[in-house]
Amino acid sequence: MNIPDSLPVSRRGVLIAGAASAAAGTIPADAMAAPEAPPKPAPGAVPTSRVTLEVNGQAHTLDLDNRSSLLDTLREYLHLSGTKKGCDHGQCGACTVLLDGVRINSCLTLAVMHEGAKVTTIEGLGTPRNLHPMQAAFVRHDGYQCGYCTPGQICSAVGTLDEIRRGIPSHVSADITARPLLSAEELRERMSGNICRCGAYSNIVEAITEVAGVTA
């Protein structure tokens, strides 16, 4: 049938409408339905993740609140209370541990960020019957005093010696292209992030120096 072009609906519009109607008839009704919204979490539900950490040589698989810091994971989930919770803002260093051999403030990082990482805490450095050389040196030089900051101090000291031995410069290194000197100035600079309220800093430097095998 010929449709005059003078009608309100053009021939082109009729053809488009007819094609659309035919196509709509071939689409299943369930395909035309609006997509279902994803299920809402239950009120008060906490998002969690499964994380595996190797802590002091032993693998632990944990279902953690995604907001759990590494510090809280060590203390609350694994009951390793040697790592201390001081300021909880990364300013005192009491929570220092070794993460894949590198010292880190465990209060400033989330445990879920470290899947498969190797963590060493003060409990993993030595035992009362078999002290780590740094632990024994702290005892000999009275570098622990009240003891609260000591776990972080010792872990940080171990990390400090490793940094120097690997040639990593610090703010006080005179030549950043040369191997850093194992000097009292270097040790004080590198350990400055670990606060000791008792003021045992000189004793701590002596302990680290002894372990390094040099004379202060």
Image (tube, helix red, strand yellow):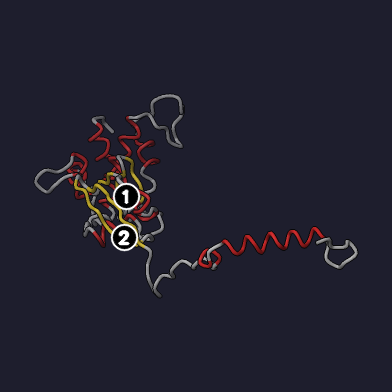
Q: Position of residue 132 (x, y in %)?
A: 18, 41
Q: Position of residue 152 (x, y in %)?
A: 29, 50
Q: Residue furthest front?
A: 1
Give the amino acid type for the residue marked by disc 2 in the picture.
Leu
The image quadrant that residue 87 belongs to is: bottom left
The one nearer the camera, 81 or 14, is 14
Give the amino acid type for the residue marked by disc 1 in the picture.
Thr
Camera-side mark, 1 or 2: 2
Mark 1 burial class by Cα count in 10 Å: few <14, some 14-19, many 20+: many
Secondary structure under badge 1?
strand
Q: Residue furthest bottom?
A: 43
Q: Position of residue 202 (x, y in %)?
A: 30, 44
- Labels 1 and 2: the sequence-earlier one: 2
Q: Residue at x 11, y 43 (%)?
A: 130
User: Which residue carries the number 2 mark?
Assistant: 64
Mark 2 burial class by Cα count in 10 Å: few <14, some 14-19, many 20+: some
Label at residue 168:
none
Label at residue 96:
1
Asked if the residues shown at circle 1 and circle 2 are in contact, with their CB atoms under 8 angstroms apart, the answer is no
Count numbered badges in the picture: 2
Q: Residue furthest top?
A: 178
Q: Can you say whether 21 is above or below 152 in the image?
A: below
